[in-house]
């Protein structure tokens, strides 16, 4: 049976969502609340609706039915710039204009704060400098984004999202295509941002990384929530087999004590 905790305090939530692309329905009657101040990670098998849900929460996909609420208002009813001042998004496949420098890309994060009669200010400069320092990309400021490694580019995109100075930050598969060292680097950065007070929401493929970094885990399968809560409370061998179809053993991570999923070994002839 799904494990559903009591409703948490939530600035961002979805109520009875039906999510679809054209005539292909991904989820029906899906309700979710993102606990304020959490590092929420959404996990599940391929094509279960993880990124679709994140896109709906970010106002990138309009639900066919139901509603997404941001600070108590239907998110589609809010002006785009107002949403961008409250919620930042790092999409799965971010692309930068050819030849743009790191400093110029990060500065684009200040666009939601620009007005017709209020252009670049000292406050904008401060926000960009802080975002670049927090992500350790200051030394890359004058380099073209095209020249950077995958890990460097991901940190630059996170810096741009940070420059928006939003209390909520959504990241869609931020570690995809990165080697293990850069994956840990990016997730450590996300954990640091969470510790500084941001509500973080990420879609991850690696269940062990999700268990290590998440304070709140949402496990999806076939467009529905199978379980949610703290990883230590919900991640069991039974849950992993139900969600992923993977027989396994769950043991404590020797570094963090969080659940560590160990697939059962193949029987040899």
Image (spheres, helix red, strand yellow):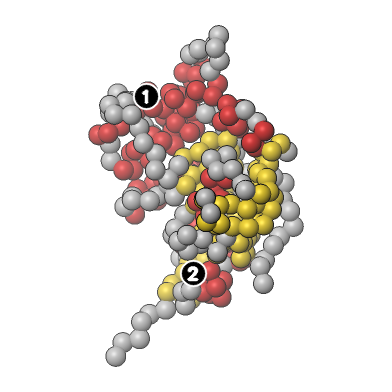
Q: Horizontal and vertical percent for residue 75?
A: 65, 37
Q: Are marks 1 and 2 in contact (CB under 8 Å)?
A: no
Residue denoted by label 1? 103
For the question of whether residue 113 can be seen, the reply is yes
Position of residue 134 relative to residue 186, above or below, is above
Mark 1: few/some/many CA within 10 Å (<14, 14-19, 20+): many
Between marks 1 and 2 in the image, the one whose residue lies nearer the viewer: 2
Residue denoted by label 2? 244
Q: Could you tell me which residue is drawn at 69 percent across and 38 percent down?
A: 74
- What mark, if any, has residue 230 been given in the picture? none
Q: Could you tell me which residue is drawn at 57 percent across and 39 percent down?
A: 59
Residue in the foreground of this view, choosing between 87 and 267: 87
Position of residue 106 relative to residue 2, above or below, is above
Q: Horizontal and vertical percent for residue 229?
A: 63, 59
Q: Secondary structure at mark 2?
A: helix
Q: Could you tell me which residue is drawn at 66 percent across and 49 percent down?
A: 65
For the question of whether residue 139 can be seen, the reply is no
Count of number-bearing discs: 2
Report which quarter residue 77 is drawn in: top right
Q: Horizontal and vertical percent for residue 241?
A: 51, 74
**Which image quarter is the C terminus in?**
bottom left
Q: Could you tell me which residue is drawn at 55 percent across and 21 percent down?
A: 113
Q: Spatial distance from mark 1 to mark 2, Cα to Cα?
A: 41 Å
Position of residue 120 relative to residue 172, above or below, is above
Sequence order check, earlier mark of 1 and 2 = 1
């Amino acid at each position: 049976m799904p494990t559903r905790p009591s409703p948490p305090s939530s600035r961002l939530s979805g109520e009875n969502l039906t999510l679809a692309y054209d005539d292909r329905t991904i989820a029906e009657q899906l309700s979710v609340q993102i606990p304020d101040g959490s590092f929420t990670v959404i996990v599940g098998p391929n094509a279960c609706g993880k990124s679709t849900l994140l896109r709906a929460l970010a106002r990138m996909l309009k639900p066919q039915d139901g509603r997404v609420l941001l600070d108590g208002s239907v998110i589609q009813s809010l002006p785009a710039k107002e949403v961008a001042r409250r919620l930042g998004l790092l999409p799965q496949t971010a692309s930068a204009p050819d030849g743009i420098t790191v400093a110029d890309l990060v500065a684009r994060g200040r666009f939601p704060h620009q007005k017709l009669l209020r252009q670049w200010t000292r406050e904008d400069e401060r926000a960009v400098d802080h975002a670049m320092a927090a992500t350790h990309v200051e030394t890359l400021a004058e380099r073209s984004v095209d020249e950077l490694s995958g890990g460097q580019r991901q940190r630059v995109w996170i810096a741009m999202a940070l420059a928006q100075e939003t209390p909520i930050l959504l990241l869609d598969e931020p570690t995809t295509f990165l080697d293990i060292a850069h994956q840990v680097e990016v997730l450590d950065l996300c954990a640091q941002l969470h510790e500084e007070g941001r509500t973080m929401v990420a879609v991850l493929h690696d269940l062990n990384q999700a268990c290590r970094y998440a304070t709140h885990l949402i496990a999806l399968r076939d467009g529905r929530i199978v379980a949610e809560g703290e990883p230590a409370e919900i991640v069991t061998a039974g849950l992993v087999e139900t969600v992923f179809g993977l027989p396994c053993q769950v043991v404590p991570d020797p570094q963090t004590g969080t659940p560590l999923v160990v697939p059962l070994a193949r029987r040899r002839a």
